[in-house]
Amino acid sequence: MTTLDGQSASEVARAGTATRVPTAEPDAHRQTPAQVADRLGVDPGVGLSTGQISERAAVHGANRLSEPTRRPEWLKFLDQFRNWLVIILLIAAVVAGAVGDIRDAVVITVVLQINAVLGYWQERRAERSLEALRRMLVPTARVRRDGTEQVVEAQLLVPGDVVLLEAGDRVPADGRLTVAETVEVAEAALTGESQPVAKSMTAVDHPSTAPVPLAERTSMLFMNTALTRGRAEMIVTATGMRTELGAIAEALRTGTEPPSPLQVQLDSLGRRLAALSGAAVVAYALSTLVRGESLSDIALRAVALAVAAIPEGLPAVLALTLALGVRRMAGRGAIVKRLASVEALGAATVVCSDKTGTLTLNEMTARTLWTAGRLYDVTGEGYGTAGALRVPGADDTPPTGELGDAVLPFALCNDARLTDGGIIGDPTEAALVVLAAKAGVDADRLRTEVPRIGELPFDAATKYMATFHSEPDGRTRVHVKGAVDVLLGMCTDVLTEEGARALDEGHRDEILAVTAQFGSSGLRVLGAATALMDGASSAFTTAALPGLTLVSIAGIADPPRPQARDAMALCRTAGVAVKMITGDHADTAAAIARELDIDGDVVTGADLDRMTGEQLAERIDDIGVFARVAPEHKVVIVRTLANRGHIVAMTGDGVNDAAALRAAHIGVAMGITGTDVAKEAADVVLTDDNFSTIVRAVREGRAIYANIVKFVRFQLATNIGAILTLLSASLAGLPSPLTAAQLLWVNIIMDGPPAMALAVDPARDDVMRHPPRDAGERILDAHRLFAIGRAGAVMATGTVTLLAVARSYVAPDTALTMAFTTFVLFQLFNALSVRADDGPLLGRYQLRNRVLWLCLAGVLAVQVAVVHLPWAHTAFGTVPLTATQWALCLGTASTVLLAELVLRAVGRHGARRSGPRGSEGRP
Ligand code: ATP
């Protein structure tokens, strides 16, 4: 809407509320956090109120970049006619109409319309499926609003919102930092700087008044960059198109996805077949010309034959198969972001899986605590605080408070919180809050009494976390928790029954023995340590940490996922190797691997560092567990496996996993625990973080590939059948068994419902009972090409023979209708034949695709109509057939299936005589 003076409605609204609603802050980087907070009318500790948010949303709109304009639907429909074959046919129809052949003109036009509607519908369906998929990956942001933390859709952010971020999060809008703990940000997308840049709360003090370059605005975070380290809070200063990214959004609009290897293969196959069909069509035209048929008849039929013979429908059905396939996968927990990954999934030979949360439940319960040389069992289940610490074998509970010091670092160096029956934060940390509660320490209360003044956030690479707290005497205390082997390297003392003592070899051995004991029962092991620092420190860095005192070790249970064992067994029969990759201790990892039946050696990250590339390549197939690995090891593992010819699926969740996810053929990110960075780098996102979902996706990938093979075989057999039928009839001196209109009708059948029903065929039961296909294999190898040629030859022989024989007994029109009907029925039987591929041709599996049977019944019904309804007689030049004639057509058409049955019986017989063959391994 535009007002009289040319202002848009939104501009008027903006002007009207300008006094109350602050607009974006271009100079926020030069201001202090307090100034920015003040100007944006927000208290960073409380966040905006609901009223403020709706008011600002009305003015600033949604926090998203404007989307590229969509092509109108009618144009997409018209695209269906932008095909040179279709254009030639339309011209042919006009010419036919002009020379008085109204019947052919009308039939061709109507058939082309039906074809266009079908093509348009296929494309639209594929597009809708993919759109629905995109909507499943809505970016969210963690915000503080009305004093509480919430997760909201990123597009609902408004200026003034307080956003909380940690390593791995994507920054959802531009903002001014108000909290920055060792923050580093990857800003390559915006500034081109490939190294992460450090950020802080300090206002930028730039000498010149000229705008500060983006790369130097170190107090700001920008939309779509990613936190690679640390923890931050920011006040949103700009949203949507007003962000720095919005300013260059036009340049960033992502292009379309490049074609997948299979698409490329099918495209080139299509082109070669088109050339071949073209030659055949010319040969056909010449042969009929020699026989002296009328030129206009020949031209029309040759063009129709070209339409029927060229597999122009393949790309559309392929796109639809992939789109529907990925939608089915999404429904089962695996969101596939790139269609090409579907092919890779079907060919995967190795799955490298994280342990925690993927193979295990990520429901942590501390089961045992070691402190001052003593072991305690921990009772109670889950995240409830009911339970206590007991001396093993006795009912003794230590006096309340006695173990307080032992769990203090666990309670304070911890960001998790317990809610009613649930948790907020990391499950490992929540288990430690529960442990502290059972030892009589209320972590929540303690955190307000002993506030944190600094921290080193947990990092999968360093494997520990540290927090700093001021002591009443002005000094600083540091609490650390993390992997025991890492802590040992930082400790100079250990808590004993007599108090803190210097850590000697004896202590060291005892601690390592406890760790090994916990680990070998499958427990996750975390140590707690603490130290007083001299003076009031403000340098919260690893280098500033003093020698620590180890106070306790906790053993935390994280049971394997119940379905993981079955999924593992399925992988074994499917020839897919599974490797566990974990940051956890080797003993813990080995114990869980045993429970899950993962075979192979256990090696650690340290072992990997000692091995040369060749040594690893030699051993890698025998390794089942990689423990204590750092994210960079994952890249080495992926590359080594890929170099050995494996197709690798690799899971990851952390910010440092992005490189490995990209290096793998199929990067799999965790939807629940995964960071934004990992999700962006991945090809597949699991909505349930579950290992079995990956295995299901592999199964689905195989089924989709098998379906692609089926409809390619189906369509090409029809193409070749049509060419051979017309050519051989012409050479035999018979009239053409198929008119132009009939050829076009056959074309609809093969591009249409039956082909699509094959594309969504349910997986065969044995789909996971053979080894993965060779990723380099061509979709049509010699074996399949031969099968296609065979089917085409049977169709041509059957149709032409029937025509020749019938002409001696019935009227010419009846014989021609019988030939046409036989050719159509051949397609129905061939659909069943290709569906079985290498499996049994007759059997229960053939009954399982109800959609296909409905389609086949539909085609049969329409064919009956085409033969028996008067209007069809005019349109297609058909005449009614008797029941016997129908039976003859059906009998002849069934030979395409019978021929396969006979061939297989002979093949099996031959195979038995020449001894067993190797495994065929064909999907
Ligand atoms: P994966 O999903 O790869 O199996 P993981 O959970 O086994 O991951 P990490 O989360 O990288 O591995 O943990 C590695 C080690 O770091 C653990 O064995 C534990 O000792 C320690 N650790 C894990 N979480 C924390 C934390 N929140 N604070 C401190 N130390 C931690």
Image (spheres, rainbow, N blue to C red):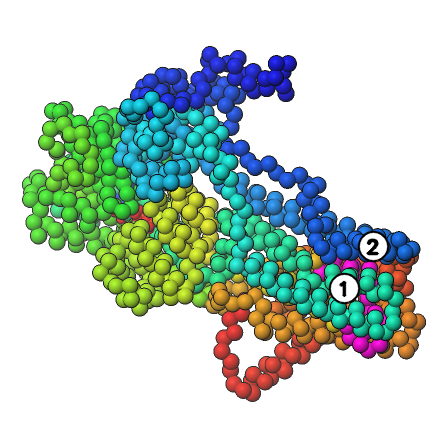
Mark 1 residue crowding within 10 angstroms, few (<14) / some (14–19) / many (20+): many
Please say if 732 is above or below 391. below
> Do tag 2 and tag 1 residues touch (Cβ < 8 Å)?
no
Which residues are the magenta region?
A: 727-750
**Position in image of residue 82 (x %, y %):** 70, 50
Q: Which residue is mark 2?
A: 93
Q: How far is the residue under mark 2 from the one under mark 1?
A: 14 Å
- SS of the residue under disc 1: helix
Q: Is residue 733 magenta?
A: yes
- In-front residue for pair 209/506: 209
Please say if 283 is above or below 324. below
Please say if 280 is above or below 9. below
Dividing the picture into quadrants, the one containing residue 205 is: top left
Q: Which residue is mark 1?
A: 305
- In-front residue for pair 254/573: 254
Main SS of residues in magenta: helix
Q: Give the mark count.
A: 2
**Position in image of residue 689 (x %, y %):** 42, 48
**Position in image of residue 486 (x %, y %):** 19, 48
